[in-house]
Image: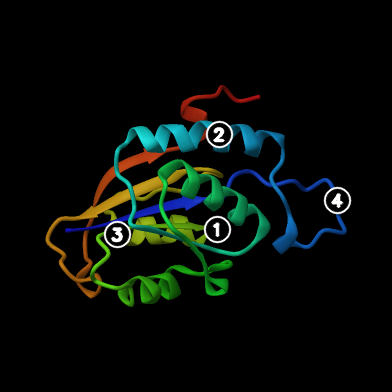
Amino acid sequence: MKRLIFMRHAKSCWDDPDISDFDRPLNKRGKRDLDRMSSEILKQQIVPDVIFSSPSVRTKITATKMSETLDVPLHFNKDLYHILDDELLGEIRLLDNSLNTVMFVIHNPGITDIRNHFLEDYLENVPTCGCVALSFEEANDWSELSEATELFFEYPKLYFSKK
């Protein structure tokens, strides 16, 4: 069995128009959401063997918090910055088969598209700081992934009212 966990970075700050997309930090809501979501994801008791993350500032902050909370190694990969689902699928197929559960902290639209690739039901959007976990019961090799079962879909608005 193989499992994938996809997490979208927490809400970023758009206050400074001179900051590049890559360098945008989290805003106040993003920090709050990340604190809550990291504890909610820990409660799921599905701990990845490793976390791979885009190196943008907002994903780096999100992934670092998750790595600390889950106590797992973290690796940054520049190819994950705004990766599309077909490219991400290629990265997944190259994963070491000694890994059974892997987490990716990435951006939209890649996260929503890869989730929709593996599940029959269509989801319009994985919100910021949203996290989707998928199980591939029959897969023993990362190149064998097909239809998945959704283990959980957590996102901040499940816990915070819209403000």
Q: How many marks?
A: 4
Instruction: Please tell me which of labels 3 and 4 falls first in the chain.
Output: 4
Secondary element under disc 2, as helix, strand or loop, is helix
Residue at mark 2: 35
Q: Position of residue 159 (x, y in %)?
A: 49, 25
Task: Look at label 1 and name its amino acid.
Answer: His
Q: Position of residue 8 (x, y in %)?
A: 51, 51
Q: Nearer the viewer, mark 2 or mark 3?
A: 2
In the rendered image, the quadrant that contains the N terminus is: bottom left
Residue at mark 1: 107
Secondary element under disc 4, as helix, strand or loop, is loop
- Gap between marks 4 and 2, in whole Å? 24 Å
- Which class describes the residues within 10 Å of circle 2: few (<14), some (14-19), or many (20+)? some
Residue farthest along the top direction in this orientation: 161
Instruction: Please tell me which of labels 4 and 2 falls first in the chain.
Output: 4
- Which class describes the residues within 10 Å of circle 3: few (<14), some (14-19), or many (20+)? some
Residue at mark 3: 118
- Which class describes the residues within 10 Å of circle 1: few (<14), some (14-19), or many (20+)? many
User: With 9 as the anchor, is 98 left or right in this view?
Assistant: left
Per the rendering, the mark at residue 157 is none
Task: Look at label 3 and name its amino acid.
Answer: Phe
Q: Nearer the viewer, mark 1 or mark 2?
A: 2
- Gap between marks 3 and 4, in whole Å? 37 Å
Instruction: Please tell me which of labels 3 and 1 falls first in the chain.
Output: 1
Secondary element under disc 3, as helix, strand or loop, is helix
Residue at mark 4: 16
